[in-house]
Structure formats: structure tokens, C-alpha cells
Amino acid sequence: MKQSHILLFLQLLGLLVCVVLVLFCIRSGSQEQHAAGILTGKWRLIRLEDSMKIVVPPTNVVQIELQFADQHFTDPNKDSDKVLTGNILSGDFKGVVELSSRQKRGVLDVEELQVNENILLERYKNFDDYYLQLLARARSYSIEKDKLTITSHGNANLVYAWVGK
């Protein structure tokens, strides 16, 4: 009888260890991109910060996101360039980002953005224009866990949360 209790205890302990290991693997796999410091994946805008104010997107219905992808199809010899795509409240945009580093912080240069306005929502136009102006003037970035901060000329910050690949 005593052996069956010990055996049951060991089985439960083994199951608990397996569950903890699975949860650890899932959690570490989702943060693997940022542990390596590679600027990839999709990011959602949380807020804009400049010396005068902090601005959050004026609606939760449409999320402002941007995504970085390698530009291997254009020039395989320039692996520091990434294609930048994203959406604004009234459309979407595309451009190329030149990076000086693949670490958790570095210099970045956003080349000319091509903007497609799908819907003209006048009440969001000022926000979209302000956001795109700050993004086009980006000069550096830093990643801390699941937060990306892009700093623009004039020390304005665009703060994003990581969404995934």
C-alpha cells in the first residue's frame, strides 16, 4: 500500500515537471526573437511621445501596426535592409528601412514611405500625418523585451508592443 502512494506521488511529480517544462518552452519560444535582438515581426503602436505631449491612437477599432521583413528578394547582398509595411488609421504604407545593427539598439533610416489612403477619415488625418512624419524622420531604435521604441529627429518616440511574426 505504501509503495502505491509513493508511485502515485512520483507520477504526479513527473507530470508537474513536464507541464512546467512545456510552459517554459512555449514562453521562451515567443520571446526568442527579442533575446537575439533581431528587428523582425509585427509591432502595434501604443503611443507617440514628444517633448510637449504623449499621444495615443484616437481609436481602438483600427490598430496601427508595422512589420519588418528581410529584403532578400530585392538584393540578397544587402542583408541590413528590411522592407517596412504597416497600416495607419486611413490606409497603409510601405518602405525600406536601412539598419546599422541587428542588435537590441541601433541606427535606422526609413527611406521614402509610399502611402495608400484607402478611406479618407478626416478626423484621423492629422494623427496619420503626424505619425508618418515621425516615422519618416526615425534615426534610432531600441528593443526591451516586447517593447520597441523608435526615436525620431527631435527626440520624439514611437512606442510599440510586439504582436508576433
Image (cartoon, rainbow, N blue to C red):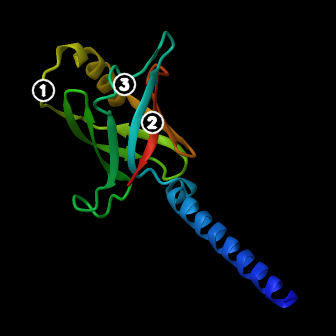
Camera-side residue of 39 and 29: 29
Quadrant housing residue 95 = top left
Q: Amino acid at mark 3?
A: Leu
Check disc 3 and report the residue beneath it.
Answer: 134
* For marks 2 and 3 on the same chain, the one whose residue lies earlier in the sequence: 3
Secondary structure state at the residue bearing disc 3: helix
Q: Amino acid at mark 1?
A: Ile
Camera-side residue of 154 and 84: 84
Q: What distance separates the C-alpha of mark 1 from that of mark 3?
A: 21 Å
Q: Amino acid at mark 2?
A: Tyr
Q: Quadrant of the image for the C terminus? A: bottom left
Q: Decide: marks 2, 1 in contact (CB < 8 A)? A: no
Q: Position of residue 59 (x, y in %)?
A: 32, 23
Q: Is residue 152 visible?
A: no
Q: Is residue 9 left or right of 19 when viewed as pictured?
A: right
Q: Is residue 11 visible?
A: yes
